[in-house]
Amino acid sequence: MIAASIDVKSIILGIEHHIEQWSEIRVVSFLFALLGGIIMVAVGKLLIHWVMKLLERGLHRSKKISDLMARYTLQLVNILGWILLSIAFLQQMGLNMGPVLAGLGITGVILGFAFQETIGNLLSGVMIVINAPFRIGDYIEAGAFSGTVTDMDMICVTLATPDNKKITMSNKLVWGNPIVNYSDIERRRVELAVSVALGSDIAKTKETIRGIITSYSEVLPIPEPVVEVTKLTASSMDLVVRPWVRPSDYWKVHFRFNGEIYDRLSEAGIAVPHTQMDVHLLTGAGEGAQ
């Protein structure tokens, strides 16, 4: 009985010793794996940073690639780099990534339905980058919104309005509407309207207006400014004035002309229209006279 008791104790002690040794080995292996993973992440981070810098230089040197396309490409490469580094880290920690990657196929279908708006914005961003309808700094109109493009990422486009409002629009909303780019053109036509009193000298009026427009250094000589009569009303003669300017000078010419036209017409002796009513009084004898 004593010998049997000693054998059982020896077996239990042996099992406990083996468990302790196994635990120590597992802890040491885990610590070595963790240390290797930390080193891998540090090296991978430096490698991603180096690749991003190298790619950024190459993209900025290329004349065919816009700043918008360069920024979008850098963001995409950065995200892909960190995804690959995360997979490598998990493998280093002993996680079998085969079943995980296989399961991502089914998970991807589920997430595709859940995040279809986000995926739509991502694909719309790709289409914007490929077709390049605008650049950073361009003044655009997309749908019911307009402003200067200040930023764009994989999800949204940021606009700054002339009255200093910040508008953030999804890429899908921008790409799904007509995009009007007011900056990506060599010249732009200013649409101005002038009304003078009915009966004014048409030739003199047109000559005076043309002299005002051609005196502006911002107005381009070619095409020539158009000054023509568009409509006659009961009390006015309406003219349209259409000079051509660079896009950056559009509002400068618009505001300057509207601020000067009244005084310049008055100096030339040309009257502006005023709403008026003619009243005729009829006098006469008799009971029926009014």
Image (cartoon, grey):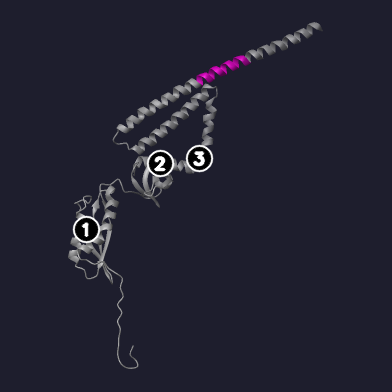
- 249 is higher (above) or lower (below) than 20: below
Q: Is residue 34 magenta?
A: yes
| Residue annotated with mark 2 | 125
Q: Quadrant of the N terminus?
A: top right
Magenta residues span 23-37
For label 3, count other residues whose C-alpha is less than 10 Å away and answer few (under 14), some (14-19) or many (20+).
some
Q: Amino acid at mark 1?
A: Val
| Residue annotated with mark 3 | 112
Q: Is residue 146 left or right of residue 5?
A: left
Q: Earlier in the sequence, mark 2 or mark 3?
A: 3
Instruction: Tell me the residue at 50%/21% (across/down).
Output: 38
Q: Earlier in the sequence, mark 3 or mark 1?
A: 3
The kind of secondary structure element at disc 1 is strand
Percent position of residue 73, x then y: 38, 34
| Residue annotated with mark 1 | 226
Task: Name the quadrant containing residue 137.
Answer: top left
Percent position of residue 108, x then y: 51, 36
Mark pair 3, 1: CA separation? 55 Å
